[in-house]
Image (tube, grey):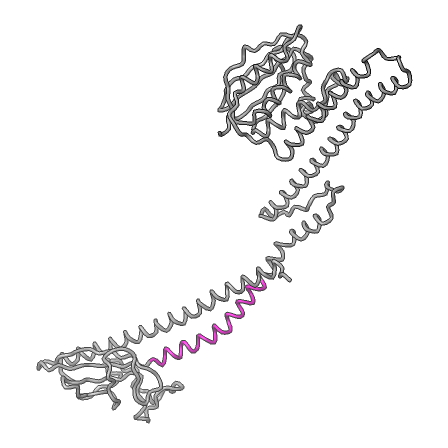
Amino acid sequence: MWASVRVRTTVGAVVVVALALVLGGLLLVGLLRDSLRSGLEGQAEARAASLVAQIEDSGVPGAISDDDDGDDSDDDVEDRPRREGARDPDDPDDPDETVLWVSDDDGRVVVSSQAVAVPAARDGEVSLPGGDHAYVLVSEDAEDPDGEEYLVRVAVSTEEVADSTSALVPLLGVGLPVLLLVVAGTTWVVTGRALRPVERMRAEVAEISDDRLDRRVPVPGSRDEVHRLALTMNEVLARLETSRERQQRFVSDASHELRSPLASIRQTAEVSQAHPGALPEGELAEAVLEEGLRMQRIVEQMLVLTRADERGVRPREEVDLDDLVLGQARRVAREGLRVDTRGVGPARVVGDTAALTQVVRNLADNAARHAASRLAVGLVEQQGGAVLFVDDDGAGVPPAERERVFERFVRLDESRSRDAGGSGLGLAIVREIVRAHGGEAHVEDSPLGGARFVVRLPRGAA
């Protein structure tokens, strides 16, 4: 069983902080030890330097003690309480905290502060006989006024270093666990509060079914990632709802559109069967052929839209748009309809030739169907792409209907009759293909008095 995000986050935070605290604690103890040791070395060096200066000025003193540095504040040591573990002044074998030796060239101790054997080392950390702690040893060379050379050694006890670090470790041992508990509790509470909106969103999404896509997840007031996640989920739900509505409307409209030619074929066949000879010869076959072609166009256009919905249009090659436009203009030209192609200039884009041919064909057919007597097409290169204009002198498209005409199975009142030849899919196909190529399509007023359909296509990349 996988732990929750809250548990994993809390455990992860505690582990990371614990490692950081342990490393920090070890570093702190090490730095404290090094700092105290450096202080002891400085103290020993200062004591040795003082004794060297005394020898160089007046020779080796007859006797030295660990407080011969001119500070008489320790003269009344007998009257002060002795620290636990400190040297007992009545025990001659217990070394003082500071021990000094002066040796001649032959290594013989000339004078010392205490009868303690001289360590073999010259510098570093050493042990003294009878001592419970290590000592920091510092050595300095000295020369008296007579030219005699001596070696001055000073050993300072590290007992204070051990006492200080020993006192710090228990504090860290208590403080670090307490701090970890604070981190764990804080992380647990903060993570729980941060994930609470996510749980509400999950519960809401669990209640959403295919027939309740109108529901939305609650959006938290915080402007963070969870807030953006909620907004994105609501946008996805809105798109799913729109897609479902479009799909239902598409199925309904498609059923209606296909029912009409089927009903016409059946009605003609039933009349012919019930009243043989009532229809002129060949009229049944002509009606069946006409309605069959109409059904074929509807099915083909539905397949084009389905493919565009599923995988879009994949640009593959450079397309000479002017060749497509001129070809479709010649195709729709007929008696009583003048087609003006003087505005067609050279323009190339990268796209699917078959799909773009469908775009130009649908626009030309739409304009020819609504034009009274004139139709004009134009094509120009503009802003790194191409702009296609298709004008007619028909009734135009009212401003309130200019977006609706691009919806599927939408036909304005003027073209509702079956004889108009439109299925209501042509302009929807135009917009889907153009959008798949990264362009846009819209309708506006035409200089000819009717409608102008405008398609903008980017140049694209080969």
Which residue is at 82% across, 21% downward? 265
Which residue is at 57% across, 59% downward? 9
Q: Residue 411: image x %, image y %? A: 73, 21
- Range shown magenta: 158-185
Where 147 falls versus 181 (above or below)?
A: below
Q: Is residue 101 visible?
A: yes
Which residue is at 62% across, 22% downward? 358
Where 216 falls versus 396 (above or below)?
A: below
Q: How many marks are shown on the rendered structure?
A: 0
Classify residue 164 by image quadrant. bottom left
Q: Is residue 181 magenta?
A: yes
Q: Residue 89: image x %, image y %? A: 32, 91
Classify residue 417 by image quadrant. top right
Magenta residues, dominant SS class = helix
Which residue is at 56% across, 29% downward? 438
Q: Residue 386: image x %, image y %? A: 52, 21
From this viewpoint, which residue is outermost toward the right?
Answer: 274
Q: Is residue 110 visible?
A: no
Where 235 falls versus 254 (above or below)?
A: below
From this viewpoint, which residue is outermost toward the top?
Answer: 336
Q: Residue 376: image x %, image y %? A: 60, 12
Classify residue 420 as left or right of residue 143: right
Point out the image quarter for the N terminus: bottom right
